[in-house]
Image (spheres, helix red, strand yellow):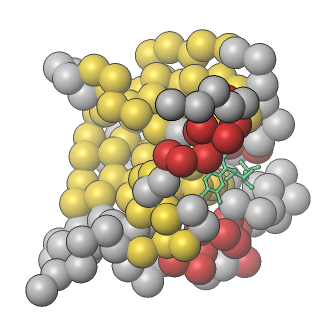
Amino acid sequence: MREVPPGEAIARKYPEWVLWVITADAEGRPNIMPAGWVMICNAKPLMLAVAVGFGRHTHACLEETGEFVLAWPGVGQEALIGQLGSCSGRDVDKFARFGLKALPARHVAAPLVDGCAAAFECAVVSQVELEDHSVFIGEVVTAHVADPPVEKLDNFNGRFAVAQPRD
Ligand SMILES: Cc1cc2nc3c(=O)[nH]c(=O)nc-3n(C[C@H](O)[C@H](O)[C@H](O)COP(=O)(O)O)c2cc1C
């Protein structure tokens, strides 16, 4: 092994999964951003954690409402990942600009998005503020899968593709 700066070692993390973090503001306006820094952090009940930068509009929405949806992008949403990750809901209605079809969630104000592989409605149970990101831990209150199934995309260092294509 060779000692290197942490940034050089962590750059070898790919492939990494990528999820949509879907929120609504206090007035119910939806927003969406891609996030790779997501983990499963409890089994029963299922909990998911996501690290969100302080400056993101998503961060403000999460603090305002305490709820969110995490969803795996599906095949066909490859280009959207870069697009939705390079503008802010503070400046633009991403659902309108990128033609996203919102579907009603059951328990949270944030919507589901048509074309995803699976989606998890989450209620924030804890927020850990670090130096430049907060980790929001969400308890999954309802889960959904695409029917018929849709394959999820993974992040191959900026190229988004299905990890194991069907035969
Ligand atoms: C593949 C990918 C993964 C990302 N992962 C994260 C992440 O885990 N946490 C985060 O805060 N931002 C992440 N970003 C950056 C946000 O998606 C980006 O800053 C977005 O424009 C924020 O939108 P908002 O201001 O509407 O919340 C990621 C971007 C991309 C393209």
Q: Residue 82 is drawn in which quadrant? A: bottom right
Of residues 76 and 102, which is closer to you in this image?
76
| Coordinates of residue 12 in the picture (x, y in percent) | 54, 47
Q: Residue 33 is drawn in which quadrant? A: bottom right
Residue furthest front as drawn: 1
Q: Residue at x 57, y 23 (%)?
A: 135
From where the camera sits, is residue 24 visible? no
Q: Residue at x 24, y 28 (%)?
A: 46
Q: Residue at x 51, y 31 (%)?
A: 1
| Coordinates of residue 32 in the picture (x, y in percent) | 61, 56
From where the camera sits, is residue 35 visible? yes
Quadrant location, the C terminus:
bottom left
Q: Judge whether 122 appears above or below 34 on screen.
A: above
| Coordinates of residue 94 in the picture (x, y in percent) | 70, 67
Q: Horizontally, is 38 left or right of 53 in the view?
A: left
| Coordinates of residue 162 in the picture (x, y in percent) | 34, 73
Q: Residue at x 49, y 62 (%)?
A: 155
Q: Judge whether 80 appears above or below 112 on screen.
A: below
Of residues 96 and 130, which is closer to you in this image?
130
Q: Residue 91 is drawn in which quadrant? A: bottom right
Q: Give the number of marks.
A: 0
Residue furthest left as drawn: 167
Q: Horizontally, is 55 left or right of 105 in the view?
A: right
Q: Judge whether 64 appears above or below 96 on screen.
A: above
Q: Horizontally, is 157 left or right of 58 in the view?
A: left
